[in-house]
Structure formats: structure tokens, C-alpha cells
Image (tube, helix red, strand yellow):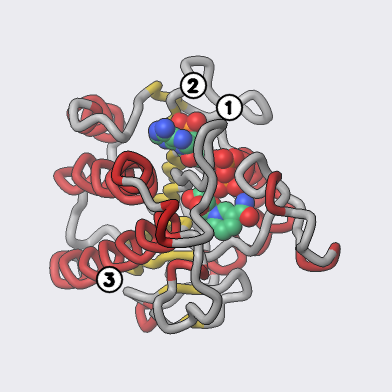
Amino acid sequence: MFDQPGSILLAGASGGVATALGVEVLQRFPDAELLTISRNAEGPQAFTPTRHLQADLTDPDSVAGVRDFVRASDDPPDWVICCCGILHTEDHGPEKALDQCEEGWLLQSMRINVVTHIHLAQALAPALKPSHPLVWASLSAKVGSIGDNHLGGWYSYRMSKAALNMFIRNLSIEWGRRLDHCCVVAVHPGTTDTALSKPFQKNIPEDKLYSASTSAERIVDVLAGLDEERNGRLLFWDGEVLPW
Ligand SMILES: NC(=O)c1ccc[n+]([C@@H]2O[C@H](COP(=O)([O-])OP(=O)(O)OC[C@H]3O[C@@H](n4cnc5c(N)ncnc54)[C@H](OP(=O)(O)O)[C@@H]3O)[C@@H](O)[C@H]2O)c1
């Protein structure tokens, strides 16, 4: 049901995984309409979307603009992939211990890892049609799994991804009631060679650090293989269900 998207909305479209996803979906579904959203005005450089919108999804005022952007198509998108996320900036890295936790960084992590996804969903919601099947995938992270946390550390990233996972679970229930066919999931892309993981790659075995194109291929495989049984799940890059 979900394996042949005719239109795809990709948000956070300038990031490493997102760029590779754009290339991948256009290769697999050359006739699909591809809509992209990014803070970047020019849009993605590695591929040409059908339409692009510059928007900062951390800003509540972005919702109205994204709403109009989505509504300019006749139908809602078949797939929505939200790639927005942050692990570090020049000034902040993931905390190793409690005494490094800081309100400002936690809130910034929440804004980028969670609120962007909420704003995108709020913008999309009015365009949804009960009979139109929908796949929603938020790129999350395995370290956001509470059940799988045996190492500790990375407080703000873990907490914000755990919050994103709860958002996805809630959304899957709400849209599961509203739509005849939908699958709302969080996906862990695997450790991928992008700007986000760059400072943390030295302890990753070479065969566990994946190129963005490999991760994109796997994510598209997972989405194309979804069924409604998977609605409301956190999925590993091979489609395995991870514990919350
Ligand atoms: N790389 C990994 O190893 C890995 C592992 C597990 C999970 N993930 C998750 O996968 C997703 C993509 O990661 P990536 O590796 O491609 O990282 P990336 O290259 O740093 O891309 C991050 C994306 O987040 C958006 N973003 C960053 N800062 C933002 C801000 N201040 N306001 C709004 N949006 C902002 C950017 O969107 P625009 O610039 O286009 O607006 C960008 O596309 C993230 O959610 C990440 O947590 C990655």
C-alpha cells in the first residue's frame, strides 16, 4: 500500500541524510513530486525538487507558510520524512555527566529535535484526507530509546529524542483514528557519516559507520516495506522494531 509514493515531502532537506534521501527517492520514484523544506533559501544542491520552501521549523510562525506550501498540491503527500535534528554545535556537545547539563542547551535540543517535527505535523494536518494513505517518518535515534539505554550520557540528545519518540507514538494514535490507512514511525538511520556524527566517529568501527547514501537506501527500503502493523513504532534501519 505504501510502496509507490507519488509525492514525498522532505523536511530538514539540506542535512547529510536528507540530501542522500532526496537523491535516493528521485532515483527510485522518478515520477514522484518531491517537496522540500529547509532553512536554506536555495534548497538542496544535490538534486532538484519539484518545489522548495525556505522555512525554519523551530519557529511557530513557519506553520502557516508550510500549510500553504503543502496545500498548493492537489493531494497531501504520500510520504513525509522529517530529518530535523541536532547533536552538537560549535559551543555545545553532548553531555557526559549530570554537571554538564544546562537548561539552554536542553531547550535548544528540544526545539530542534522535537518542536520542528510538531510544527511540520501541525502544518500538514489540515491537508490530510481520511481516504488518502500516509507514511510519516521522523528520523530519531536508537539512543532515544529508554529501554535500550545501558550507557548513559548524552542527556539532552537522549531526552529530546525520547520526547520525539513519544510525540510519534501519540501522533500515530491520533492519525491512526483519523485516517483509513496510515503508518507513523520513528526511524533510527544508523550511525551515518554526516556533520552531525563527525566529532564522534573515532570510536565507531569502520563497518558500523555508514555512508549517507547507504543509510538513505535503507530508510527508503524500510518506508517502502511498511504496513499498518508498524504504525507507532521506533524502527532500526533494517526495519526491526526497537524498544521505546
Ligand atoms: N548521522 C547520524 O549518525 C545519525 C544517527 C542517528 C540519528 N540521526 C538523526 O538523523 C537526522 C538527520 O541527521 P544528519 O546526520 O543528516 O544531520 P545533519 O546533516 O546535521 O542534518 C540535520 C538537519 O536538521 C536540521 N537542523 C539543524 N539545525 C537546525 C536548526 N537550528 N533549526 C532547524 N533545523 C535544524 C537541518 O535542516 P535544514 O538545514 O535543511 O533546515 C538539517 O537538515 C537527525 O534527526 C539526527 O538526529 C543521525
Label 1 secondary element? loop
Q: Nearer the viewer, mark 1 or mark 2?
A: 2
Image position of 180 (left or right of 243): left
Give the amino acid type for the residue marked by disc 3 in the picture: Arg
User: Which circle marks residue 169 in the picture?
Assistant: 3
Q: Residue at x 66, y 43 (%)?
A: 20
Q: Are marks 2 and 3 in contact (CB under 8 Å)?
A: no
Q: Position of residue 4 (x, y in %)?
A: 51, 59
Instruction: Name above or below for residue 138 compared with residue 227.
Output: above
Q: Are marks 1 and 2 in contact (CB under 8 Å)?
A: yes
Mark 1 crowd level (few <14, some 14–19, many ≥20, 10 Å Cα): many
User: Which circle marks residue 44 in the picture?
Assistant: 1
Give the amino acid type for the residue marked by disc 1 in the picture: Pro
Label 2, ligand 1: CB separation under 8 Å: yes
Q: Position of residue 70 (x, y in %)?
A: 29, 35
Instruction: Name above or below for residue 96 compared with residue 109.
Output: below
Q: Residue at x 23, y 63 (%)?
A: 171
Q: Which residue is mark 2?
A: 40
Label 3 secondary element? helix
- Measure how far apart labels 1 and 2 are at the Cα level: 8 Å
Q: Position of residue 209 (x, y in %)?
A: 76, 60
Quarter placement of the N terminus: bottom left
